[in-house]
Amino acid sequence: MANREALRELQTRLASRLQAAKAEGANVSSWLAVETAGERYLLPLGHAGEIFPWAGVQAVPYTHPWFLGVANLRGSLMGVVDLGGLLGSAVTRTEQNLVDSSLLALNPVLEVNSALLVDKLLGLRGTDAFISSEAPGETAPDYFGTRYTDAQGALWQELNLQVMSQSPVFLSIGV
């Protein structure tokens, strides 16, 4: 119950900050910052949907390990993808560490009933939060955008969720 209240409070704070920034005409944050499998990612706000606490996921047989199964999220049946696993990290999930995780539904405009499992929500970020950037490497997936470095030296990878949600890797959940 405490997780739901904390998540609701985070969503309220994020919405309030967005509204305040729009009202002031300030530089509006363009990404939701998340961490999963020890890596930091920037997800476009326009591609992100509602945030949910970890909920029971019904496993689906004969799928890749990164496809955790399906969940009923506010009346919609959604496939749940472990973002870290999809991006190639070997992630060991236990019920204990899943309790602190969140499910980020993809925006309905992407026309994919999916949610991403992320370990931590780190708030909103704009380009002003970073001191340098570089283009993705030649071997990076199509959905990798710019790679940023913040003032503390942490690396952040931008992900284009629209391109990712239409990629053959994402759409091919079966083994």
Image (cartoon, rainbow, N blue to C red):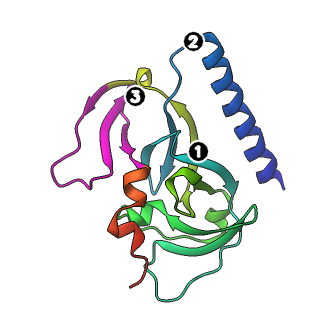
Q: Are marks 3 and 2 in contact (CB under 8 Å)?
A: no
Amino acid type shown at disc 2: Gly
Q: Position of residue 104 (x, y in %)?
A: 59, 54
Q: Is residue 114 above or below residue 159?
A: below
Identify the residue shown where x is 22% and y is 38%: 135
Which quadrant is home to the C terminus? bottom left
Q: Nearer the viewer, residue 108 or 51?
A: 108
Q: Earlier in the sequence, mark 2 or mark 1?
A: 2
Give the magenta range.
132-160
Helix, strand or loop status at disc 2: loop
Which quadrant is home to the N terminus? bottom right
Cα–Cα span, label 2 and label 1: 25 Å
Q: Is residue 34 above or below residue 151?
A: below
Amino acid type shown at disc 1: Leu
In this view, the residue farthest toward the bottom is 62
Helix, strand or loop status at disc 3: loop
Query: Is residue 133 rendered magenta in the image?
Result: yes
Cα–Cα span, label 3 and label 2: 27 Å
Identify the residue shown where x is 23% and y is 43%: 136
How crowded pointer 2 is (Cα within 10 Å; few <14, some 14-19, many 20+) is rated as few
Q: Nearer the viewer, residue 125 or 161?
A: 161
